[in-house]
Amino acid sequence: MISFDNTEIAFKSKSDKDLKKAYWLFKIVGNPSMVKFGKSATNFSLKAKLPIKGIIKATIFNQFCGGETIKDCKHAIDTLGNFGIGTILDYSIEGKTSDEDFNATVKEIVSTINEAKTNKNIPFGVFKVTGIARFAILEKANPENAILNEAEQKELNDVISRVDTICKAGFEAGIPVFIDAEETWIQNTIDRITVQMMQKYNLEKAIVYNTAQMYRHDRLEFLKNEIKEAREGNYFYGIKLVRGAYMEKERERAIEKGYSSPIQLDKVASDRDFDKALELILDNIDVMSLCAGTHNEESSDYLAELIAQKGLEKDDSRIYFAQLLGMSDHISYNLAHNNYRVAKYVPYGPIEEVMPYLLRRADENTSVAGQTGRELRLIMAERNRRKK
């Protein structure tokens, strides 16, 4: 058992001032009315070009983001690295639609991989396919038997080429790359492209990683099939395991379109499948690499237990834990203190471009049961410990 209640270790990198700011921030995002008002006010202010970037940067941006550029993130990278925690630079801009923007994003993601090549504290690269492709083409190609016209096929080929550029950069630099999971109605397209990249770049080790959202009730069987195909195809399979990020949207769309929801009936089922997936992956660790993206103490502790049961080293390079910057430091820092491999997702980008990500973080802390309360409880415990 790892003690995730050791707040001295959890907040060792935080000053008293840092803790005070985090306390008030989580107090605010724990209030649904304040979050709703804050979202409206922020969106209005940015559209009206009101001078609020300084306020955003000093509060929610500073808590959950590394900076506006790769260079700005150096302080966060170094601070995490001093405590044995890696950084996953996540260029978190959204909503682009032009080829020019897509190609610029590819260039930026490749820059994060090149940065990782020269910095031992950056173990992975990451990107979302919707950051380099129109959502509509991914949706059109999603069915197995999708028929695309000539222009659509060319557009999809361009998307595959962009993905290939990033994965090739990861391969040449020796830096694994996560391809994030997204909505079910585009995920089949993403899965197929990802496997195509694995077949090309994962012949010696896992460079390309897919992502499985375990709040989907079909993902455990999906993983079993993916492992079977990887063995038959003689390639390694990298997987980032998460619970999921689009639950409300998925359920609403299922009702609207009249199909069965792809989401588990309850959190218990999601937790069960997440832990079963951990077992499945470690049972097949000879052909797999894992990043367990979780803010759940029980699953983190269970993975540590499985590592011991399988006779694996705590710092096995095929097994990572990951959390988001600004959240669950009690998990990240205590795991790293116990010599497990841990990394933090560190989003970055221009403030106005990163706002959709930041607003989702605020929503998540408001809607996920106990999330804000847990953060506040731990911060208060550490502040009290320091006073004593």
Image (spheres, rainbow, N blue to C red):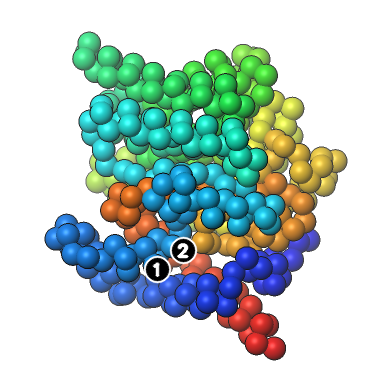
Q: Where is mark 2, residue-wise?
A: 63
Q: Is residue 215 above or below residue 338?
A: above
Where on the picture, by quarter, is residue 221?
top right
Contact, mark 1 vs mark 2 (Cβ under 8 Å): yes
Most extreme residue toward the bottom is 388
Most extreme residue toward the left is 48
Where on the picture, by quarter, is residue 235?
top right
Callout 1 secondary element: helix
x and y percent of residue 337 in the render? 74, 58
Asked whether 216 or 102 is in front, the reply is 102
Dot 1: within a 10 Å radius of its alpha carbon, few (fewer than 14), some, or many (20 or more) residues? some
x and y percent of residue 188 in the render? 41, 28
Callout 2 secondary element: helix
Residue lying at 22% horizontally and 11% vertically, measured from the top left: 150
Residue lying at 46% horizontally and 34% vertically, measured from the top left: 111
Q: Amino acid at mark 2?
A: Gln
x and y percent of residue 233 in the render? 62, 14
Residue lying at 57% horizontally and 21% vertically, measured from the top left: 172
Q: Where is mark 1, residue-wise?
A: 59
- Look at the image and tell me in which quarter the C terminus lies: bottom right
